[in-house]
Amino acid sequence: MENKADAFQIFVDFLRREGLNVTRGRLAVLRALADLPRHFEAAELWEAVRPRVSPATVYRTLGLLEKAGLVRKVEFGEAHAHYERSFGREDHGHLICRACGKVWEFPMGEARKIVEEAAKERGFALEEIVLQGYGVCPDCKARRKPRV
Ligand SMILES: [Zn+2]
Ligand SMILES: [Zn+2]
């Protein structure tokens, strides 16, 4: 997916296809989303649109954006869900620190091809590739070391 303008078109088409109204609130959520950091929580999205848009609309719209393929839920091993924008960006993997929850991105490179080939061999209709590494970041590693 290329950019913001495409994302709006895709969302509007999706809403029409689903027989849903293209409301100001729904578009405001998408607009706010484009300005958030790549990874965000639902609460941060609401912060960006309040008080113009109700939390219920934010959550519902987030679900619609997910269905439209513009947002995906990412599991970072924490209790609350994180989301990320899937437009205007490259495919990438995540490195997640289990101590502080920070997330780093890296390009998927060859990994993408490996998964695609495995899917092709099995006639599998691939929809999404998730590549994540869990561990401890350099800062947390340094903090954990006992001082001598
Ligand atoms: Zn850390
Ligand atoms: Zn990411």
Image (spheres, rainbow, N blue to C red):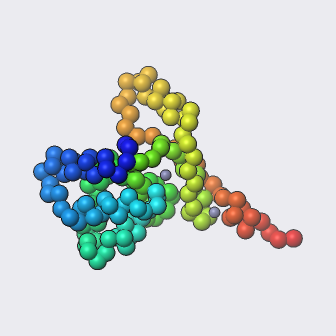
Image point 73% across, 68% down: which residue? 143
Q: Quadrant of the N terminus?
A: top left
Q: Residue 8: x percent and y percent?
A: 28, 52
Instruction: Find the residue positioned furthest to the left.
Output: 19
**Residue 100 point in image, percent of width and height:** 60, 65
Relative horizontal placement of residue 121, taking residue 142 as reference (left or right): left
Residue lying farthest front? 5
Q: Up-down: is 65 above or below 122?
A: below
- Between 68 and 32, the one lying in front of the other is 32
The answer to whether 15 is drawn above or below residue 142 in the figure is above
- The answer to which quarter of the image holds residue 32 is bottom left
Nearer the observer, 87 or 67: 87
Horizontal side of 117 relative to 64 (left or right) equals right
- x%, y% of residue 65? 29, 54
Q: Residue at x 41, y 62 (%)?
A: 35
- Report the residue at 38% width, 58% height from top: 34
- Would residue 74 be seen by someone viewing this image from the given angle? yes
Q: Is residue 15 above or below residue 36?
A: above
Task: Give residue 119's position: percent from left, percent from top.
Answer: 43, 28
Specify whether residue 67 is in view: no
> From the image, which quarter does the C terminus lie in?
bottom right
Residue at 24% over, 61% down:
26
The answer to which quarter of the image holds residue 136 is: bottom right
- Identity of the residue furthest to the top in this view: 121
- Is 62 placed above or below 109 here? below
